[in-house]
Image (cartoon, rainbow, N blue to C red):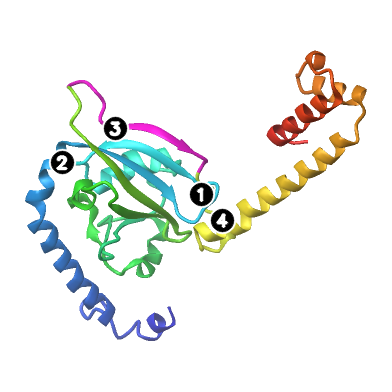
Amino acid sequence: MERQMLTQYIYNSDNPSPETQFVEYLRQKKKEELQNSLPGAEPLFSKVLVLKVEMAYIQPPVWRRFKVCGGVTLNVFQDKILSPIMGWVRHYHAYHFTDVRDGAEFGPEQSTAIDMMHKLRHGHLWIDDSTIRIAQLLQQPGDVMLYTYDLGDFWLHEIVLEEVQEPLGEGQSTCALLDGAMSCPPEDSNGFEGMGNRKYQANFLDTYFEAKGEAVRQGEDQVDGMGVKALKEFLRGRGVNPAGLLEKQDLVRCAKELVRRRGP
């Protein structure tokens, strides 16, 4: 950023920076490679790809498994499928895809998203994602590409091709959500300093689960100190009939299980 400020009057659209010139060379080279490999990718355009997307570096994992046609372009993939199933707001923030084999990046040719101001932090130049199809980047099970949503907050996702299936019959939907868990982080999480997944893990998830774990431990200690009558009242208050629990140890075990599941 400091170098950009110092050289802002030297480089412009007519005289691009050395970094931009270098990336432009790589971009043209990648375009030629994709064009030359197109005949090998085209048979996959009609196939069904089973994909798994997971946010990197986050526990518990935030993930979705879904299927989609291999011929869908990356811009439609992001707008109609990927961002909706993850829970991101459509047409709100910018994004880009990354081919992990060589670092080539694909994104919108034109975008009015405010976070486009951070584009220089994301590779300078992209290949127009409306010209590239999913199956040009993911062809064999195990193939991976990256998806970054919101150039400011920097939410990083890993997309893995798990299976290639034959085309479905007429009238059957090619695109479907199959499985998944956890919700995506909130939009505009500026409190995480634009550091994305790792900050979300450290500043929110770890703190939340640490506090929840401490509350559960205190609840279990409280259960250990209860008498039989108090234990039965505790269970009834949570909708559990203690009639079949004859021994105190059974009452304690049931009460602790409720604490772990629902909280104290």
Q: Which residue is mark 2?
A: 45
Amino acid type, mark 4: Tyr
In primary-sequence order, the first of circles 4 and 1 is 1
Q: Residue at x 78, y 29 (%)?
A: 255
Q: Which residue is mark 4?
A: 200
Where does residue 21 sit, x and y in percent of width and height?
22, 77
Residues at marks 2 and 3 touching, judged by CB atoms closer than 8 Å:
no
In primary-sequence order, the first of circles 1 and 3 is 3
Residues at marks 3 and 4 touching, judged by CB atoms closer than 8 Å:
no
Task: Measure the C-alpha gap from mark 2 to mark 1.
Answer: 33 Å
- The secondary element bearing badge 1 is classed as loop
Q: In the figure, is residue 163 to the left or right of 213? A: left
As drawn, the residue found furthest toward the top would be 243
- The secondary element bearing badge 3 is classed as loop
Task: Measure the C-alpha gap from mark 2 to mark 3.
Answer: 13 Å
Amino acid type, mark 3: Cys
Q: In the figure, is residue 247 to the left or right of 172? A: right
Decide: is 64 above or below 255.
Answer: below
Task: Specify whether residue 25 is in view.
Answer: yes
Q: Quadrant of residue 42?
A: top left
Find residue 169 and name its label: none
> Magenta region: which residues?
170-183
Q: Which residue is mark 3?
A: 175
